[in-house]
Amino acid sequence: MRSRLPLLALFPATVLTVVVGTPFVLGDHPVRWESGSRLPEIVLDDSEEPAQAPREPGTPSGPATGTSPSTASGLQVAKPWKEGMPQWGVQLYWEEEQEKRSGSFIEAQARKHATYLIGLGANSVSLSFPFFTEGVTSNTLATGAKTPSPGRLAQVLKVFKDAGFRTTLRPIMDEAALDPPDGWRGNIEPASRSAWFSSYGTLLDPYLKAAEQAKADTFVIGTELNSMEGDPGWEPLVTEAEQTFSGEVAYDANWDNYVSGRINMPVSSLGVDAYFPIEVPDTASVGQLVEGWNEWLDKKATGELPNITIAEAGIGAMDGAYHAPGDFYTKRALNPEVQATWYTAVCQVVQERRMKGVYWWSIWFDDDPNTPPDDAVASRLDFAGRPLTEKAVTSCFTSDYAGPGTDTAS
């Protein structure tokens, strides 16, 4: 049964102004404005190719583990996720392309990603996909040409579920129509909130059914919707969702709202999209970054955080990225060490504060994770194909952290 998550009171007003104001200058929610995607344009061969095995250890741009285990029926994670274990995962983002809708292509891509993630030691995957609105004050929410169908999402989820992954389905509002960067999903103000929730419920229903069909573990009812948090419209929406979907219904808060106030949402699980800016040089140690993360988290609560999942964590592999981890607006000199050190530090924080786990942002579904990113066009936040970061991820995912144990949310 769900319960409202007990979160702490607001900061003093002066602190809150800095916390909330800073993200929109530096970039706290990684997005690509050019075509409304959260990821950079990636040009791919649209041929239907079979899934590839992970690269061998020590080869360029390869994960640090060897080949993945398998069963007679196909892929299988080494230690399938069970309740109480840490969620070691990746956000897989899917903007569907018209020419890549065949079932065989989708199946091959899903298996390719499953193989890659097994090679990293992952046991969880979150499948994020876009839906669309007409503007900051719009009451209408709808799918678009780049929104995968419920059936195709269920097909991908099934591949991961059959391989032993913990699975999450995560719709996320595209920001192309919101006049970014000033407008974003966190400051929408629908003209009629009742109409907005009605439209949202209609949009979500077939995806909740797909998640149920695929036996997903979690459905994220909303992501980074700062201005809508606490609205009474969530209660009936979540109740209806729970009648359709038997798994966990969650909400993913943006980091600024998480640290500055109570996230008043009627859900059973809370995730945080965590892009905490830390004012340290590029040469900062893991310990310095851990200290910076803890300073932010301590604004909410000190000590262990066994009910919190880091739903998104990532950073650009570039100079100066610690000051604005989610910055998609600039592309400074490549610096893989910055990204790898950040990943190591975040994993340490997750373990020391006994969180539920972490999902790294992100891998594009149509991409080949075995291919190093083309840094002339790819986002600096891409981590697949960056050997130092892959090594950090593998070290995290194969650590001896046993997880927060029994969920004590109340």
Image: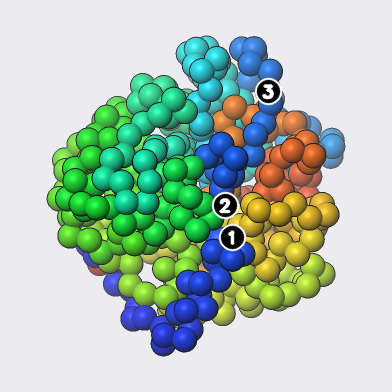
Q: In this image, 58 relative to 326: left or right?
A: right
Measured Cα–Cα span from mark 3 to mark 2: 22 Å
Q: Position of residue 253 (x, y in %)?
A: 41, 60
> From the viewer's perspective, is residue 202 above or below residue 8?
above
Dots 2, 1 in contact, CB < 8 A: yes
In the picture, which quadrant includes the N terminus? bottom left
Q: Crowding at label 1, few (<14), some or many (≥20) Cα neighbours within 10 Å?
A: many
Give the structural element (helix, strand or loop) at label 2.
loop
Q: Quadrant of residue 122?
A: top right
Residue kind at label 2, given as amino acid type: Pro
For label 1, the residue is 27
For label 3, the residue is 44
Q: Crowding at label 3, few (<14), some or many (≥20) Cα neighbours within 10 Å?
A: few
Q: Nearer the viewer, mark 3 or mark 1?
A: 1
Give the structural element (helix, strand or loop) at label 1.
loop
Q: Position of residue 103 (x, y in %)?
A: 48, 13
